[in-house]
């Protein structure tokens, strides 16, 4: 299931030109277009693969006005890539430069793992001498901000790869491979180009600074809209303090999935500047929390139009207590990645039996065992009545890691 590279909405459609980036709506495609158009047509018009060990990559030259899709080939001895058969892409000294191979594993704007892993080569010296800012990278970022938190100097080469786990390497041995691979290169996609842009903009992104509430205040979660997230250089969600009680506003509702999971959450849409100005006010975390999951409802499995593009949203516990960090986001992602595919299949069937079958396993235990990006293993977490405790999840994760260590 392809996700929108702007708001992560599932069931996204590929760009008609490059087929390498996915969008859920014209609104999200328009949000990304000023940057995406720099590489869309050149990427689509790349020639045939020169050989089986050539891979698609993106080259950001210092004085260029746009990134350049290229074919790269990695050396078997030092992993220094050649671009279109030449090692001089970094400068006249070729391999003689001291290089940095930076790993980008998570998109700080969406808080989602980047798969496959994103890597980029750059020259160490360019970051500390009087080199000018990389213009092709600056051009890609400029539609969103004039002051990204990270600016590159000198040429940059971006590529993607898969790193195999110890268990996967054992399976390769059992399958007859004499020297199991630790990693494998892959063609870069323009979804990863978007991840690179976000990396530059949100390199030092921090969640909303949370001031401890006064006696009449409580902690809630704030989901930023796509527009607010891009312009504020903050991640998609964070904690804020608000005045108690956390009551309903003009657009307010209680999440069905949170009730099913035993921790009812109230969502209040904010009257944001983004909504009134017509910007991209998508907020998928809030949208999926407000999916109708009451199987007796005629609108079961749908999201009301008001919650499809709600702008930024505050989320708090109905009982008025402080909300623990990541709880609302975890529920939303669980609903998006685990519950929604089940609901979609049941909607295609159209029977009450299919609805009941889809919703029967949806419970707190299923959430505990949800394979989240934050904790990338199925965890056996102690059950606590109607409470989702991140500390239990972390303890289980640490226990898992300890059990997997090799002497």
Image (tube, rainbow, N blue to C red):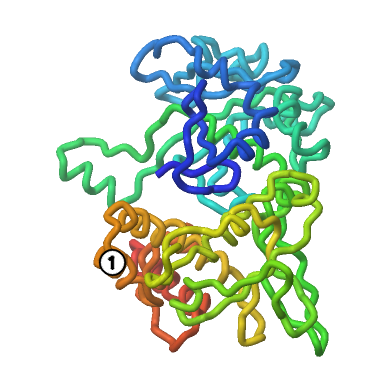
Q: Quadrant of residue 214?
A: bottom right
Q: Nearer the viewer, residue 282 or 39?
A: 282
Q: Is residue 42 left or right of residue 115?
A: right
Residue 55 place in picture, x, y as percent: 43, 22
Q: Is residue 50 left or right of residue 24?
A: left
> Is residue 271 among what the camera can see?
yes
Let me know if residue 203 appears in the view: no
Q: Is residue 133 left or right of residue 96?
A: right
Q: How many marks?
A: 1
Q: Give the percent coordinates (x, y) of residue 152.
A: 73, 32
Measured from the top left, where is residue 247 in percent x and y? 71, 80
Q: Quick one: SS at disc 1?
A: helix
Q: Residue placed at 54% from the left, 79% from the top? A: 264
Q: Nearer the viewer, residue 34 or 272?
A: 272
Seen in the picture, residue 88 relative to 261 is either above or below; the reply is above
- When the figure is inspected, residue 19 is found, relative to residue 191, above or below; the finding is above
Q: Residue at x 61, y 82 (%)?
A: 318
View extreme (front): residue: 298
User: Dot 1 surroundings within 10 Å: few (below 14), some, or many (20 or more)?
Assistant: few
Residue at 54% from the left image edge and 38% from the top image edge:
23
Q: Residue at x 52, y 66 (%)?
A: 330
The x and y percentages for residue 80 are 51, 24
Out of 120 and 26, give the one closest to the viewer. 26
Residue 50 location, quadrant: top left
Q: Which residue is mark 1?
A: 352
Q: Quadrant of the N terminus?
A: top left
Q: Which residue is nearer to you in this view: 356 or 175? A: 356
Q: Is residue 396 above or below residue 168?
A: below
Name the quarter where the C terminus is drawn: bottom left
């Amino acid at each position: 299931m392809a996700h929108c590279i702007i708001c992560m909405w599932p069931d996204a459609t590929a760009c008609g030109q490059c087929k390498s980036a996915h969008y859920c709506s014209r609104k999200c495609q328009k949000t990304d277009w000023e940057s995406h158009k720099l590489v869309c047509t050149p990427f689509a018009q790349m020639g045939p693969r020169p050989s089986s060990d050539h891979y698609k990559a993106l080259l950001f030259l210092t004085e260029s006005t746009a990134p350049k899709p290229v074919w790269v080939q990695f050396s078997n001895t030092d992993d220094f890539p050649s671009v279109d058969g030449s090692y001089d892409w970094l400068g006249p000294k070729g391999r003689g430069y001291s290089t940095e191979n930076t790993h980008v594993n998570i998109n700080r704007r969406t808080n989602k793992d980047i798969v496959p892993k994103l890597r980029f080569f750059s020259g160490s010296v360019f970051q500390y001498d009087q080199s000018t800012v990389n213009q092709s990278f600056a051009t890609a970022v400029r539609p969103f901000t004039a002051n990204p938190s990270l600016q590159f100097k000198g040429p940059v080469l971006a590529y993607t790869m898969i790193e195999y786990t110890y268990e996967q390497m054992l399976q390769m041995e059992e399958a007859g491979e004499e020297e199991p691979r630790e990693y494998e290169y892959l063609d870069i996609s323009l979804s990863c180009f978007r991840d690179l842009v976000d990396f530059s903009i949100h390199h030092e992104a921090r969640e909303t600074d949370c001031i401890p509430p006064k006696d009449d205040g409580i902690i809630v979660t704030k989901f930023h809209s796509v527009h607010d997230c891009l312009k504020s250089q903050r991640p998609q969600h964070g904690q804020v303090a608000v005045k108690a009680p956390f009551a309903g506003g003009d657009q307010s509702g209680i999440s069905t999935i949170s009730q099913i999971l035993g921790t009812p959450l109230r969502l209040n849409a904010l009257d944001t500047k983004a909504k009134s100005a017509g910007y991209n006010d998508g907020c998928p975390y809030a949208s999926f929390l407000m999916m109708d999951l009451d199987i007796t409802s005629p609108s079961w499995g749908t999201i009301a139009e008001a919650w499809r593009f709600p702008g930024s949203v505050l989320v708090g516990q109905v009982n008025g207590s402080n909300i623990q960090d990541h709880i609302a986001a975890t529920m939303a992602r669980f609903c998006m990645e685990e519950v929604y595919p089940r609901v979609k299949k049941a909607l295609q069937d159209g029977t009450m039996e299919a609805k009941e079958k889809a919703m029967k396993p949806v419970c707190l235990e299923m959430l505990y065992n949800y394979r989240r990006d934050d904790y990338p293993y199925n965890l056996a977490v102690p059950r606590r009545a109607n409470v989702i405790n991140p500390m239990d999840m972390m303890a289980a994760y640490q226990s898992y890691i300890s059990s997997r260590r090799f002497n």
